[in-house]
Amino acid sequence: MATRPASFRQSDLTRAVKGVAAAGVRVGRVEIDPNGKIIVMAETLLQATSSGSWDEVLR
């Protein structure tokens, strides 16, 4: 099976992360989907949503 070319470049990822950091937001996680879409999640968002059970979130 042939290898397909990458759908994003490292410079694209670097630019996205630096832009988020320049806005004063701490990067918590980065996801890249198969189409090359780059999703940067804030650290505070991850802390708020990963607290554990849904009972704690819904209170």
Image (cartoon, grey):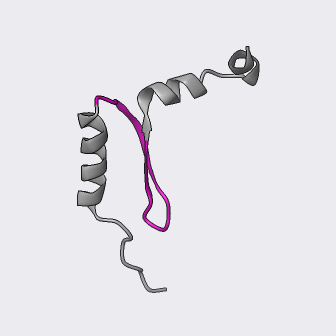
Quadrant where the C terminus is found in the figure: top right
Image spot of residue 7 (x, y percent) = 39, 70
Pick out the residue farthest to the front. 23
Which range is magenta? 24-40
Image spot of residue 4 (x, y percent) = 41, 80
Residue 19 appears in which quarter of the rendering?
top left
Instruction: Count the numbered circles shown.
Output: 0
Pick out the residue farthest to the right. 55
- Residue 35 in the magenta stretch? The answer is yes
* 25 vs 27, nearest the viewer: 25
Q: Is residue 47 above or below residue 19?
A: above
Residue 22 appears in which quarter of the rendering?
top left
Q: Which residue corresponds to the image point at 30% horizontal and 44% vertical from the top-left?
A: 17
Q: Is residue 53 left or right of residue 20?
A: right
Q: Is residue 40 left or right of residue 14?
A: right
Image spot of residue 52 (x, y percent) = 66, 22
Q: Which residue corresponds to the image point at 74% horizontal and 24% vertical from the top-left?
A: 54
Q: Which residue corresponds to the image point at 42% horizontal and 29% vertical from the top-left?
A: 43
Q: Which residue corresponds to the image point at 30% horizontal and 54% vertical from the top-left?
A: 13
Q: Is residue 10 left or right of residue 57?
A: left
Image spot of residue 14 (x, y percent) = 25, 51
Q: Is residue 8 left or right of residue 46?
A: left
- Residue 37 in the magenta stretch? The answer is yes
* 52 vs 49, nearest the viewer: 49
